[in-house]
Image (cartoon, rainbow, N blue to C red):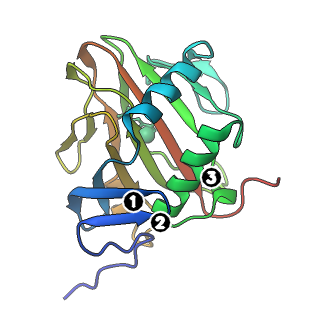
Amino acid sequence: MTVKEQTIMNVVGNKIHTSDQEITIVGKIDEPLILILDNVLSAMECEALIDLAKSRLQRAKIGSTHLESDVRTNSSMFFEESENELVLKVETRVSELMGIPVSHAEPLQILHYKAGDQYKPHYDYFTTGQVVNNRISTLVMYLNDVEEGGETYFPSLRLSVMPKRGRAVYFEYFYNDNLLNELTLHAGNPVTVGEKWVATQWMRRQRHRYL
Ligand SMILES: O=C(O)CCC(=O)C(=O)O
Ligand SMILES: [Fe+2]
């Protein structure tokens, strides 16, 4: 018998309570742990995040060279760490949900996909060079309903997560067995009709913020 590896999040039942939100688990894969969660953000919070991000978008850049890349055709922005009440509230809730302190959180990222935009399959953790303080987990929060397409797709698991306002997909890649980490390969499928907004929170193994 093979023993399941320790996970970061310890999930029991079908609800997760943070200090200000009741989140519903609507789907789960045990290993690697992947959760589909509803009511992570309220409709008002989703709208407000989109409004705040809109004027600050730029074409998504990938990797340390900051070359525009066809891996991502969407556009993105980062909020400053806890830059306003709403961002602070979301960061706090998300860190409680993910079981990782806010000090380990990267700045909250907003992505915007127009029809035709996509994010090709990738790992969220860094694999090149000597990696210190790597990423360990991700929460992708959907800020709007997408008319068609725009699923988050895990090709190795053949799992599609449909975007829906307030919903999120959680996954972690902190396993000793690297094959489990590799199963978290994922993509943002092309948006075929409409547009797609997401907020992504990445967590680091160690402290990443110093204020
Ligand atoms: O847009 C998506 O569904 C996936 C986004 C993503 O993979 C990321 O932000 O790292
Ligand atoms: Fe990703």
Position of the N terminus, as image quadrant, is bottom left
The image position of residue 186, as x and y in percent, is: 33, 41
Classify residue 12 by image quadrant.
bottom left
Q: In the image, 110: left or right of 178? A: right
Q: Is mark 2 within 8 Å of ligand 2?
A: no
- From the viewer's perspective, is the residue at label 2 or at label 3 nearer? 3
Classify residue 56 by image quadrant.
top right
Which numbered dot is residue 181? Answer: 1
The image position of residue 198, as x and y in percent, is: 42, 31
Q: Label 2: how many residues lie within 10 Å, few (<14), some (14-19) or many (20+)?
A: many
Q: In the image, 96: left or right of 4? A: right
Query: Which residue is under mark 3?
Result: 105
Which numbered dot is residue 174? Answer: 2
Q: Is mark 1 within 8 Å of ligand 2?
A: no
Q: Secondary structure at mark 2?
A: loop
Q: Quadrant of ligand 2?
A: top left
Q: Are marks 2 and 1 in contact (CB under 8 Å)?
A: yes
Residue 94, placed above or below residue 48: below
Q: Are marks 2 and 3 in contact (CB under 8 Å)?
A: no
Amino acid identity at mark 1:
Asn
Residue 29 or residue 16, whichever sits in front: 16
Q: Secondary structure at mark 3?
A: loop
- From the viewer's perspective, is the residue at label 3 or at label 1 nearer? 3
Q: Residue at x 71, y 61 (%)?
A: 207
Q: Residue at x 52, y 29 (%)?
A: 49
Q: Is residue 166 visible?
A: yes
Amino acid identity at mark 2:
Phe
